[in-house]
Amino acid sequence: MLQELLLWVAGVGSAITLVRTFHRCESELRFLRAASFLSLVSLFVSTFFFSDREQPFFFVFFLPWLWLLLFPQIVLQRILAAYDGRDWERVIRLSRIVQGGIPLLRGRFAWGRGWERLAQAEQLLLSNERERAVSLLRELAALPSLFGYYAAMRALFALEQWRELEALTFQFLRSGKGRPTFFVVELNLRALLLLGKDEEAQKRLDSLREFFTEESAQYRILQERLAGGVEGALREDFPLSETAAGKFRLPFPFPVLFLGALLLLAFFAGRVMGSDRFIAYFAFDPFQILLFGEYWRLLTCGFVHTEVAHLATNLLGVLILGPFFAKRLGFFGFLLFFVASVVGSSLFLLGLMWCSLLEPQLLIGASGGVMGFIGGYLSDYLQLYRKSGSPYQKSRLHGILLIIFLQSIFDIVTPRVSLVAHLSGALVGFCLSWFFFSRRRSEAGHLD
């Protein structure tokens, strides 16, 4: 079961990366595209030519995914976060880590060195060595890469070319090349303020509100810049690290950890009670529900797991997919969303079995609720794409559709897994998300 779980995680991650980077020309994303293709080939070979998955050699085929895809993706995200926080030393350290860890990052894929030089240009600006910094920024801006975009924007700001900076940053935001980063949004707002377009700057921030939670340090800084007008736009003393100083932060939102704790508690309760007895009392059993009115099974089945790998799979889904909904729906809204997805999926299955359209069977696991989160993502991405039409939203929509497709293939070829339960959970989550988020979408603005 562990091998199948690893295959699923690595395969889906590689496929999504391949789809989302397919038409991109930046060196960072071209490398990830090549790495994802190599990972898929390696996983394909391991699946169809090495059937004995108990052998340690089987795990060798996961190295391309771990080393060439997962590792550089994590480091690149941390580089972008460090750059948003103006932590140039950290950017340099991370860039050198990825250069040392992946010797293949040379020539056309040498994006690690590019981010290091970009951070060095920022340090030159801080040292008032403007000419050297601008020269280096222009050199980097000529390269097709994410750091090239950043260098071009930073050079325009250093040269005080506000109109060109506003046009470039707005083009980047509207093109949908990626999720709007704090760096690009901040430079766009600063350019608008320096051009005397305060009202337009506020509207722009409102249109991008979905990407920044209102209690975050980034959103606070953007608001302070708008409140400060031209003076706020020229300020350089907004270190993001100060906002988190001395504060303990949970690795995941509390509602997500609470739900994970409930799933773990139910699992250990089943071990103490005995798996067979626990299933007999709490699993989804259509006969017990319809003949004896044991309707609690519609919900409790979502908390029953008899295998560690099954529990780990659903816990991983909750931890990865849950934070998006926890931050937007709050504690009770998040739990209600999960419970409604599980119950809705159970009711859908019960109706099919009652109509003799599906063979009656016992079902357990939180997969219906997890697939509800996936359906919720699909609904949210679809609304965003219909509203903006941006390539970024389109790529996210394709990614979530790919997950549903691959999950369906996995359900079909895997015994004891219910395809209908998963698809019904996704359908319920889609409807719930449309109900919860449609009003918020109608009130939010958009880039124009």
Image (cartoon, grey):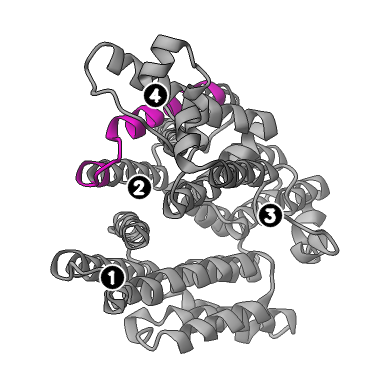
N-terminal of the pair, mark 2 or mark 4, is 4
Viewer-proximal residue among 76 and 232: 76
Kindly report the distance in space between the C-alpha atoms of the residues bearing marks 3 and 1. Answer: 57 Å
Q: Position of residue 372 (x, y in %)?
A: 45, 33
Q: Which residue is labeled 4 in the image? A: 285
Helix, strand or loop status at disc 3 = helix
Q: Residue at x 39, y 37 (%)?
A: 389
Residue type pointed to by label 2? Gly
Q: Which residue is mark 1?
A: 54
Q: CA distance from mark 4 to mark 3?
A: 60 Å
Marks 1 and 4 sit apart, C-alpha to C-alpha, by 34 Å
Range drawn in magenta: 410-437
The Cα atoms of the two marked residues, 2 and 3, are separated by: 33 Å
Which is in the foreground here, disc 3 or disc 1? 1
Q: Amino acid at mark 1?
A: Glu
The residue beneath circle 2 is 399
Sequence-earlier tag: 2 or 1: 1
